[in-house]
Image: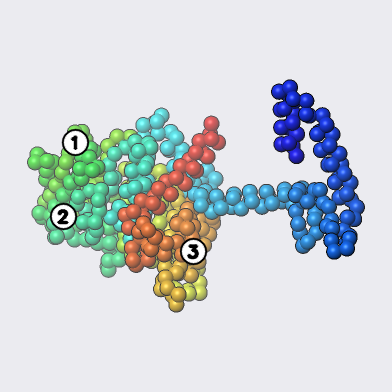
Amino acid sequence: MLIGILHLYNMQEKGLNYFKQPFILVLAVAILFTALSFVNTNFSVTNYQTKKIDFFSEIKIQKLGVAFPLPPVVFTNSIKDSLAAIIKAKQLLAVNNFAADSAGSIIHFYRALANMKLTGKKVRVAYFGDSMIEGDLLTQDLRSSFQKGFGGRGVGFVPITSIVAGFRQTITHSFSKDWNVFHLNSDGGTSAMLGLSGYVFVPNDGSFVRYTAPKAYGNFGIIKLYYGAGNSSAIINVNKDGASSSLKLDGIATVNELVLNESGAVNAITISFSGASAVKIYGASFESGAGVYVDNYSFRGNSGLPMTKIPYSVMQGFNNKMQYDLIVLHYGLNVVGHNVKSYQWYKAGMEAMVKHFKNAFPNAGILIVSLGDKSYRGAAGWETEPDVIKVVDVQKQVAKEQGVAFWNAYENMGGYNSMKKWVEGDTVFANKDYTHLNHKGAKKMSDIFYKKLMEGYADYVKVME
C-alpha cells in the first residue's frame, strides 16, 4: 500500500494529477477493513463461506491458534538470555584470571608485556607440560607469535639430551651417548640434583653436545650454559663454527650461568666437557634481543605432580637468571582414566604443585592449561573419554581455589568429540591415537591460545589507560 502511495506521489511531482483521488480511495479501504477487523465477518451465503477479516494479522504472532500482540517483556528477556549465553560462552573460552594483583595472577605477565618497551627487559615464559608439547610442539608456534608481535629471536632453553631431538624442528640437536641422565622418574636420591626441566645431566670426560641453527630460524645470537656448583678443574671446550676456546665451570651457586656467545651470529656450537664428572649440567639457552622467549619444559608421561621433587633452590636459581613472567602448567593427559570414581587425589596433588611454583616464582603469573579432548573406542566408535570433563573440572577448581589463571583447552578445541573431528576431518590436525596433536593441530591450538592471551592483554591495557 505504501509503495503504491509513493508511486502516486511521484506521478504528482511529475505533473500528473492522479494523487488526490486514489489516496482518498486507499484511505477509505484501509478504514473499512480496519473496522471490519473488529466485527464478525465469518458467515455462510449458500455454498460460500466467508472468513474472518484481520487487517493486522501480519504483525501479530500466532500461539496455539490464537493471535497475540508481541509482548515487549518477552522480547527483552530473549535479548537478556542471548547476551547471557554469549557472555558465558566467551568466558568459557577465555583465559580466566582467578586472582587479583597478587602471587600467581596473570597480571604479572600482562604488566611485563606492557612495560617491555620502556624497560627493554625480556619477557620470559616457562611452559611445562607432558608429551603434548614435546619436540617444541605448540610452544614453537606460540613463541613465533609472541616474537612477531613483541620482538625477540631464539628458541630459549634446550636440555643437554632429549629423546625427541630428531623430532624437533626449531633446533638441530645431537649429543654423545655417554651422558649420565637423571630425571623425575629415576630411582635413588637424585631429586636434589634435578633441574627445572625435571632432568639433570652429568658428563664423562669427552662427553659433548652440539646445537645447530636451522636455516628457517636464523643463526644463534646470545648462547648461555646453565650448570650447578662446579670446580676449578671442570673445563669445557667451546667450538663455534670452527673457532675453539676453553672456559672453566667454576661457579659456586646452585644454578650458574655461563655466557658462551655474546655477540655475532653463530651457526653451530659444540660443547665438550673435561674434568666435570661431578658437575650437574642443565642445558643451554639461545636468545637475541629484547622480546618474548618461551622455554619448553616437556616431560613425557608426566602428570605434573612429580614437579614438586624439583628443589626450591634450583627453581629459584633458574628464576634468578631467567626472571620468568609467566609459568604455564599444561598437564592432565597422563591423569585421565576411564570411569574413575574420584579425582580428589589429583586435586590434592595439583594444589601442592601450584603452591610449589607460586613459592618459587613469586613474581610470575601462573596459568593452568587444561587437558584437551581425548577419545577412546566405545561401542559406537571413537568418542570423548568421559573422564576428560572430570579432570578439566578439577583443574579449573584448583585454579580458582589457588588464585591463578585457567584456560580451557578442551572447550577451545570444540568440546565433546572434537578430537574425533580433528583426526577425521578434511584437514588432519591430530594423530590416529586420538590423543596427540600433529604439527598442524599444535599450530591451530597455539593460534587459538595466543589469540585468547592477547584478548586478555588488550583488556588489561584498556583498564590501565
Q: Which residue is mark 1?
A: 265
Q: Amino acid at mark 2?
A: Phe
- Measuring from the top left, give residue 398's x and y in whole percent: 50, 59
Above or below, comparing residue 385 to residue 108 in the picture: below
Image disc number at residue 416: 3
- Dot 1, crowdedness within 10 Å: few (<14), some or many (≥20)? some
> In the image, is 415 to the left or to the right of 192?
right
Distance from label 3 to label 1 (Cα)?
A: 48 Å
Which image quadrant for residue 48?
A: bottom right
Q: Residue at x 13, y 55 (%)?
A: 207
Q: Residue at x 16, y 51 (%)?
A: 209
- Dot 2, crowdedness within 10 Å: few (<14), some or many (≥20)? some
Q: Amino acid at mark 3?
A: Tyr
Judge whether residue 155 can be spotted in this image: yes
Q: Residue at x 50, y 43 (%)?
A: 456
> In the image, is 69 to the left or to the right of 293?
right
Mark 1 touches mark 2? (CB < 8 Å): no
Q: Which sits in the foreground, 89 or 166?
A: 89
Distance from label 2 to label 3 (Cα)?
A: 42 Å
Q: Earlier in the sequence, mark 1 or mark 2?
A: 2
Q: Which residue is mark 2?
A: 175
Judge whether residue 360 can be spotted in this image: no
Above or below, comparing residue 4 to residue 375 in the picture: above
Q: Residue at x 80, y 48 (%)?
A: 56
- Measuring from the top left, give residue 350's x and y in whole percent: 45, 61
